Amino acid sequence: MAGEQFAERQVDFAGEACSIDAFVAEPAGTSPAPAIVVIQEWWGLNEHIREVARRFAREGYVAIAPDLYSRQGHKVANDPNTAAQLMGGLKTPDGIADLKTTVGWLRNQKRTRTSRIGAIGFCMGGSYALLLPCESKEISAAAPFYGEIPQASKIRDLSCPIFYAYGENDGWIQRADVDRLAKELKEFGKRGEVKVYPGCSHGFFNDTRSDVYDATAANDAWDRALALFSHNLKS
């Protein structure tokens, strides 16, 4: 039930190259619950991403936000230049490997051992949230927000329903690629929705950034993501 009590904690577990730090928020109680992997923007595992995880916990999910910059010393950026350097230092195969390790950690927890698992990500994390279910069948639903679109050969392997959110004025992700995603979902018989928000910029969901945040679009995208996860993880 939305608004229920939750607990939060920091955890770490062994990854391929180093110990992976992660933030976990989970509903009160001990009964099994569906799980969501929350994937960071290029800034790192900051307070905004922790708050997204808390929001999912309030909705009844066990949410985990792994630090994808664990290999780079668990850094968090406050300016675009540093963020670009950190994102550039993360090789895509390494990010996918650490996300798969995160899913494996969830599978070893009593509360989520038999749970369905979803993924959501923003910006850089949106790229990983779309690519991960193309690389792993462990993900039952994914909500990538304004992430890069992988090649058609990857979309062909997409293993779960998705909701893809995109701002019309995004200066990073090309509209042609977003349109291609919508086309390929239909072409390959994949379940998914691609939603373009008029007048919105890249990062419109991030309510800590007044320069790009759009409350109306963010709330609509959140509701659509919740509906996707409720249908595919809770039913």
Image (cartoon, rainbow, N blue to C red):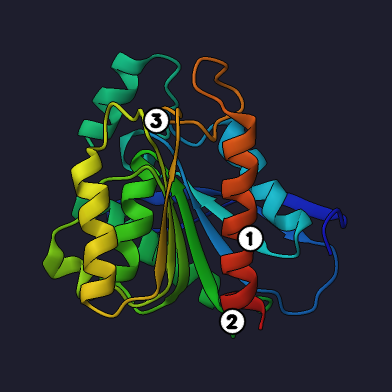
State which quadrant residue 129 falls in.
bottom left
Q: Position of residue 181 (x, y in %)?
A: 25, 58
Residue visible at 18% across and 67% down in the picture: 154
Q: Position of residue 198 (x, y in %)?
A: 45, 34
Assign the N terminus to one quadrant of the image.
bottom right
Residue visible at 66% across and 83% down in the picture: 235
Residue 69 visible in the shown view: yes
Q: Position of residue 227 (x, y in %)?
A: 63, 65
Query: Which callout, 2 or 1, points at the residue further toward the start of the chain?
Result: 2
Q: Amino acid at mark 1?
A: Leu
| Discs 2/3, front | 3
Give residue 113's mark. 2
State which quadrant residue 135 falls in.
bottom left
Q: Position of residue 128 (x, y in %)?
A: 33, 53
Say which of 127 and 85 sits in front: 127
Q: CA distance from mark 2 to mark 3?
A: 35 Å
Q: CA distance from mark 1 to mark 3?
A: 21 Å
What residue sits right under mark 3 in the picture?
A: 202
User: Element at badge 3?
Assistant: loop
Vertical position of residue 103 compared to residue 222: above or below:
below
Say which of 115 and 120 sits in front: 120
